[in-house]
Amino acid sequence: MVDVRIVKDDKEMTTPHYVHEGDAGIDLRSSVEYVLKPGETYAVPTAVRMAIPEGYAGLVWDKSGYAAKNSIHTLAGVIDSGYRGEIRIVMKNLGKENFEIKKDMKIAQILIQPVVRANLIEEETLDDTRRGHGGFGSTGKH
């Protein structure tokens, strides 16, 4: 377990928390009312700031129910440990209907994850593998 300090800029908002024992994600909520139109992208404010410790990052993910039922997707989902500003959830309405966001409504979830920093080494070539340059669909359909 890791300690993550938070500040709520709107004290009336529900404090972010895990809903069930064993949950991976902490629910984040909208601090505004907004109607997200089909095809629209909007950075929804949460009125929450976090001090994620060095060596960790916050990864923002969809709420599965909104994704499955309303085609709502979250974008730009990495909160770095050095960031101290308000967390905003970039939401995209991929559906055909307006999506009504209410104040204090769960809109996304954040997972606090350890991060391994890579030591990038520039080379002229890379070793060969069985997959090689095979990209999208290269492993087959079944």
Image (tube, grey):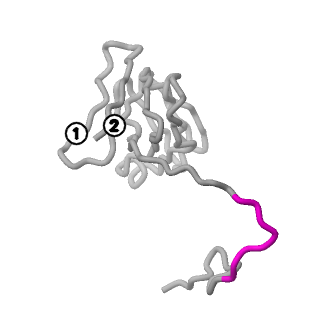
Q: Residue at x 29, y 23 (%)?
A: 14
Circle 2 crowding by C-alpha within 10 Å: few under 14, some 14–19, many from 20: many
Q: Which residues are magenta?
A: 121-128
Q: Is residue 114 above or below residue 83?
A: below
Residue 132, image x, y percentages: 68, 81
Q: Residue at x 57, y 83 (%)?
A: 139
Q: Amino acid at mark 1?
A: Val
Image quadrant where residue 43 sits: top right
Q: Residue at x 49, y 28 (%)?
A: 87
Image quadrant where residue 51 sits: top left
Left or right: 115 in relation to 68: right
Q: Look at mark 1 in the image and give the residue it sits on.
A: 19
Q: Look at mark 2 in the image and give the residue it sits on.
A: 27
Q: Residue at x 53, y 36 (%)?
A: 80
Which quarter shows the N terminus? top left
Q: Please tell me whether mark 2 sits on a helix, a strand or a loop.
A: strand
Magenta stretch: dominant SS? loop
Q: Amino acid at mark 2?
A: Asp
Residue 133, image x, y percentages: 71, 78
Q: Please tell me whether mark 1 sits on a helix, a strand or a loop.
A: loop
Kindly check if marks 2 and 1 are in contact, taking CB atoms under 8 A apart as contact: yes
Left or right: 90 in relation to 122: left
